[in-house]
Amino acid sequence: MQICGIDDAGRGSMLGPLVIAGISLDKKNIRKLSALGVKDSKKLSPKLRESLYKKILEIVDDYHVAKISPRIIDANVKKHCLNGLEAKCMAKVVARLNPDVSYVDSCDVNPSRFGRNISRLSGNHRIKSYHHADSRFVAVSAASILAKVSRDRAILKLRKDHDLGSGYPSDSSTVKFVTKYYEKNNEMPNFVRKSWKPVQKILGKS
């Protein structure tokens, strides 16, 4: 019985990719993840996430990490279709890993609808969709660690050239960076999500 867990990282960020990660493993190995101390990535320090990332890859049978660029995010936000974009991307992960059942962390207010959507897009795979699945199911917790570490690495790469903070609108360093960049260059860098409300505000469109 192959179990899959899927989660995202970076959904609320003003910049950088939205990352979707999935893992699949035999049901009997689920307890090995718990024994490692795998839990929702938000409850772990960056250092611990990095060390668990490597250990998770040794236990799982397969995994897949997908990065969605700001350009694609913007195009889908314009169509009011961000949840649809996530469902499509999660469905690709499910189709690729081909498990018996997948547990997903729902970004839709209606988790059942989100699950049905992924099932339809993945060729009718069995999907169990819940809010806070990353703290309820260890397979999803493992996926959340892969997604968060991959997202942090992408931001770290950008930080080599730019002082941009965490990327989130609640971070004043991020807002300052985006504002200054726009004032200086009269355009946004390609790693900024132009459809985000705080960015629209800087662009003077709201």
Image (tube, rainbow, N blue to C red):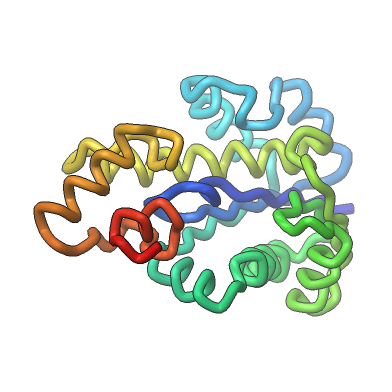
- Residue drawn at point x = 32 percent, y = 39 percent: 174
- Residue 52, position in %: x, y? 58, 27
On the picture, is 85 further left or further right than 158? right
Residue extending furthest left?
184
Residue 1 shows in this picture: yes
- Residue drawn at point x = 83 percent, y = 57 percent: 111
- Residue drawn at point x = 30 percent, y = 33 percent: 173
- Asked whether 131 or 196 is in front, the reply is 196
| Residue 205 vertical position relative to residue 28 in the rendered view, above or below | below
The C terminus - image quarter: bottom left
On the picture, is 96 further left or further right than 102? left
- Residue 125, position in %: x, y? 84, 70
- Residue 30, position in %: x, y? 82, 36
On the picture, is 99 further left or further right than 38? right
- Residue 25, position in %: x, y? 76, 47
On the picture, is 94 further left or further right than 145? right
| Residue 116 vertical position relative to residue 156 in the rendered view, above or below | below
- Asked whether 133 or 22 is in front, the reply is 133
- Asked whether 15 or 22 is in front, the reply is 15
Q: Quadrant of residue 157?
A: top left
Residue 96 shows in this picture: no
- Residue drawn at point x = 65 percent, y = 70 percent: 92
- Asked whether 7 or 74 is in front, the reply is 74
